[in-house]
Image (tube, rainbow, N blue to C red):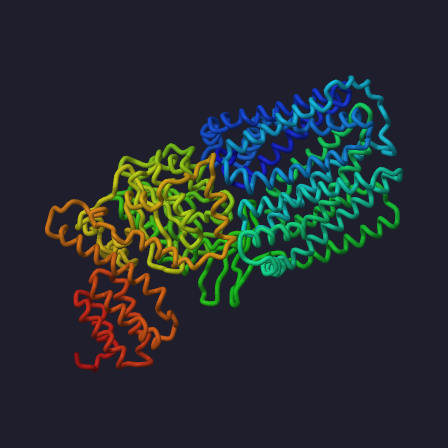
């Protein structure tokens, strides 16, 4: 809920975590003495639970009303200090009534159990039970409540849980007498409370730091959906709870408490080192688990859970037992448990900033992880020979791991790939990779291919189409830049200025490797790159744009779903000029048709005149564009000639397949009415009901059919489009003829894409000639404007020439007869067969 205003930058995400922990710590410290001295702890507990529940309900109304204000307060491109400060202070204060009350529940329950059964050592059991509850809460909210009920209803159910808990407790202890005032019992064998406070703080710091860094490392391999992060969080909490439970069952005897602390700290350091070592084999390990659990959603989630168990379970078992032991050591008659919780949680609050924001981008995930066991070494209260020897062995292991850095890059490469650059930044790990054919690609977190030199044709068409559909754009906005190729296409329009918003700063830094496709973006005064969250930018900016182009946001990626919501689309519409238009590109190869319907339904809710276009005619990686504005787009037959009056732009567009009004509008798929009939009634994707966030991962985890099947399904559903949907009223004879030509183009296009699923797409020119040449020639005859089929035949003839010259010659002659309006076949024939008679 907070990400809507604060953005999805990792600075914001980690600041919210720190703010939440800080509120817990403050509440635990302030309430420790009062609740520990209370003679009616049940009243305290009920009051705290009521505060939590009531504030949860209040946030349902407060947060939506504050989102716009906070987005503006942060600004479009804030400094790091401003961004972190606001992202921390806002959630800290807005959540404080609830988080402070949460911090007081453990010490008050510890006091209550002393009253119920006289148990002065219940803190480990209580901590364990409470944390097991957190596991169940994470599971229920992520996998059931939020997907089914949305944010507000889930908040109400959880608030009801607080109210029920408070009422049930009061009923259970009803009629019991007041407790006597507590006796101040010394803190066992703990001789130096200050040193225990330091150990609690450092172990909290190291524990959450370990979680932040391991999650970052595993994100290079796992799918990075909302379920991926929930699985890792559940295992972290489960291990902590189990460790506390084990300690509760076994740690009630009398023994040297300082020695126990040493053993636990050594064990935690050793387990952390084992997990760090295991990262060397994370990719084949995950592949084995995927094979073991099989395909499908259940198998994929189980594989991610198993990965989290492997890397988190042993360290967190030791962490849970360590905290329980330290809290027991500090417990005295008038407090101690709350202070222990405060210091441990305060350390956890500092961890995201220290490890995630400061340390990770400076030394990398491998060396940052090695500081975790080093932190545990610093906490040893004993310095005897056995402990020194054990610590020395672990230190040598750390040196060994530090020297072997290549295995911790966690970057999957194909044969022939070379890494040009690799940077582990605050937001993500960003790599630039050159393949065996000298193509350069941008990879983010080892998963997302964000463009490259081999996709220039497709990338630039994603900019050209919306820019050509507008009569005279002066200012454009691009949301999401990737390699920068789509954004760079704006430079081909001399009168156009463009702003580009990119979330990940390391992606911006990597754009220099793609100058072959983009040119020098930094030197172009008409192009401005802004490092910001796209959602927050469109909420905060006051600029008005003629064209806004949104990149291919992977719907299943955690956080991307908020860029397909009603609220986001409405914010985008607010930025459009009177004749402005918005184009949202959708990767049909990365989502199923049900998710597609949710996004289209949401888009039409904000842009009732929305239309659908194709970016290109690829059957393996189809891209669909949703285009909307204040009015329905309709064009006269002479639009293309008027729009491309300049010789340079006309020649450039011809090279990218936009050589006529028919090739431009030939990408049109469906109008608003057809889209509404197809998507029908159903849920919208909103901030309060984020349907895409939970629906899209099911496609990634499943075993979907190739994207061509979804593309053909859509084309079949939209096959009866009337050209009047996109063409203007008949004014001239050319307008009348244009309807027939455009309809013929669409028919040829759909048959061409269907043909692509049937022919043998081998690189063998002879076999391709046998299977594809005749159907392609038929398409050329059916539509003289469908140049895609025309140039496909030319390509076959050229590839066939070294193997069968007679067949190559005849194919070119047939192509000339099929479409005598185009000169290219005759020109190639003259070049290849100059001595042959015509």
Q: Position of residue 101 (x, y in %)?
A: 65, 25
- Vertical side of 361 occupied by 163: above or below: above
Q: Position of residue 163 (x, y in %)?
A: 61, 25
Instruction: Determine which quarter of the picture holds residue 827.
Output: bottom left
Residue 489 visible here: yes
Instruction: Determine which quarter of the picture holds residue 260.
Output: top right
> In terms of depth relative to the viewer, which is nearer, 524 or 669?
669
Left or right of residue 400, residue 75 in this image:
left
Residue 406 visible here: no
Left or right of residue 244, residue 522 in this image:
left
Q: How many marks?
A: 0
Q: Position of residue 59 (x, y in %)?
A: 53, 27
- Vertical side of 347 occupied by 210: above or below: below
Q: Residue at x 39, y 72 (%)?
A: 762
Q: Residue at x 72, y 20 (%)?
A: 174
Q: Residue at x 73, y 22 (%)?
A: 173
Location of the C terminus (image quadrant) = bottom left
> In terms of depth relative to the viewer, which is nearer, 225 or 763?
225
Instruction: Determine which quarter of the picture holds residue 406.
Output: bottom right
Left or right of residue 809, residue 402 in this image:
right
């Amino acid at each position: 809920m907070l990400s809507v205003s604060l953005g999805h930058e990792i600075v914001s995400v980690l600041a919210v975590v720190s703010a939440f922990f800080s509120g817990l710590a403050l509440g635990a410290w302030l309430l420790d003495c009062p609740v520990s001295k209370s003679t009616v702890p049940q009243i305290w507990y009920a009051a705290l639970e009521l505060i939590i529940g009531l504030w949860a309900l209040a946030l349902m109304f407060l947060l939506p009303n504050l989102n716009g204000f906070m987005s503006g307060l942060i600004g479009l491109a804030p400094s790091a200090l401003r961004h972190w400060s606001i992202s921390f202070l806002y959630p800290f204060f807005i959540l404080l009534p609830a988080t402070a009350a949460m911090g007081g529940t453990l010490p008050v329950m510890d006091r209550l159990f002393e009253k119920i059964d006289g148990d002065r050592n219940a803190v480990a059991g209580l901590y364990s039970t409470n944390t097991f509850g957190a596991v169940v809460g994470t599971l229920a909210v992520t996998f059931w409540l939020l997907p089914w009920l949305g944010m507000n209803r889930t908040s109400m159910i959880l608030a009801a849980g607080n109210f029920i808990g408070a009422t049930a407790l009061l009923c259970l202890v009803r009629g019991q007498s007041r407790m006597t005032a507590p006796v101040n019992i010394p803190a066992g064998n703990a001789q130096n409370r200050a040193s225990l406070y330091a150990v609690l703080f450092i172990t909290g710091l190291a524990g959450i730091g370990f979680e932040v860094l391991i999650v970052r490392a595993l994100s290079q391999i796992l799918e990075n959906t909302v379920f991926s992060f929930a699985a890792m969080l559940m295992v972290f909490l489960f291990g902590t709870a189990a460790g506390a439970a084990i300690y509760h069952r076994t740690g009630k005897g009398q023994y040297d408490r300082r020695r126990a602390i040493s053993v636990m700290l050594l064990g935690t350091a050793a387990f952390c080192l084992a997990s760090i070592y295991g990262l060397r084999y994370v990719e084949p390990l995950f592949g084995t688990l995927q094979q073991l659990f099989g395909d499908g959603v259940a198998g994929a989630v189980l594989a991610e859970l198993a990965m989290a168990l492997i890397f988190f379970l042993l360290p967190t078992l030791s962490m849970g037992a360590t905290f329980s032991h330290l809290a027991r050591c500090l417990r005295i008659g008038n407090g101690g448990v709350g202070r222990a919780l405060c210091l441990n949680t305060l350390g956890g609050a500092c961890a995201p900033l220290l490890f995630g924001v400061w340390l990770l981008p400076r030394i990398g995930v491998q060396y940052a992880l090695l500081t975790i066991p080093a932190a545990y070494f610093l906490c040893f209260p004993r310095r005897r020979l056995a402990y020194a020897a054990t610590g020395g062995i672990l230190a040598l292991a750390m040196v060994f791991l530090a020297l072997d850095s290549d295995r911790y890059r966690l970057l999957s490469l194909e044969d022939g790939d070379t890494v040009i650059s690799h940077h582990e930044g605050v937001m993500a790990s960003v790599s630039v990779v050159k393949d065996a054919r000298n193509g350069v690609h941008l990879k983010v977190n080892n998963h997302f291919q964000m463009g490259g030199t081999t996709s220039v044709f497709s990338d630039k068409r994603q900019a050209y189409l919306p820019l050509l559909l507008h009569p005279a754009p002066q200012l454009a906005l691009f949301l999401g830049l990737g390699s920068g190729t789509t954004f760079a296409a704006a430079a081909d329009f001399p009168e156009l200025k463009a702003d580009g918003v990119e979330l990940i700063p390391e992606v911006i830094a990597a754009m220099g490797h793609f100058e072959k496709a983009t040119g020098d973006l930094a030197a172009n005064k008409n192009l401005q790159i802004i490092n910001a969250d796209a959602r927050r930018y469109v909420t905060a900016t006051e600029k008005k744009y003629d064209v806004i182009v949104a990149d291919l946001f992977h719907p299943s990626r955690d956080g991307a779903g908020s860029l397909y919501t009603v609220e986001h689309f409405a914010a985008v519409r607010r930025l459009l000029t009177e004749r402005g238009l918005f184009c949202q590109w959708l990767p049909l190869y990365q989502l199923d048709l049900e998710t597609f319907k949710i996004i289209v339904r949401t888009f039409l809710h904000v842009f009732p005149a929305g239309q659908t276009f194709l970016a290109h005619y690829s059957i393996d990686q189809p891209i669909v564009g949703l285009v909307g504005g204040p009015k329905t787009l309709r064009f006269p037959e002479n639009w293309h000639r008027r729009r491309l009056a300049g010789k340079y732009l006309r020649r450039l567009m011809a090279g990218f397949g936009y050589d006529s009004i028919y090739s431009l509008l030939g990408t049109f798929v469906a109008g608003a009415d057809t889209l509404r009939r197809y998507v029908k009634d159903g849920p919208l994707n909103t901030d309060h009901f984020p349907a895409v966030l939970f629906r899209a991962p099911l496609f990634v985890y499943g075993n979907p059919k190739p994207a061509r099947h979804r593309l053909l399904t859509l084309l079949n559903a939209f096959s009866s489009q009337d050209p009047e949907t996109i063409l203007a009223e008949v004014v001239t004879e050319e307008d009348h003829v244009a309807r027939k030509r455009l309809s013929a183009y669409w028919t040829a296009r759909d048959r061409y894409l269907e043909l692509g699923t049937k022919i043998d797409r081998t690189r063998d020119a002879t076999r391709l000639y046998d299977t594809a040449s005749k159907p392609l020639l038929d398409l050329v005859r059916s539509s003289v404007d469908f140049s895609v089929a025309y140039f496909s035949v030319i390509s076959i003839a050229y590839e066939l020439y070294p193997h069968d010259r007679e067949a190559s010659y005849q194919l070119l002659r047939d192509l000339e007869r099929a479409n005598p309006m185009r000169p290219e076949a005759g020109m190639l024939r003259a070049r290849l067969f100059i001595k042959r008679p015509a």
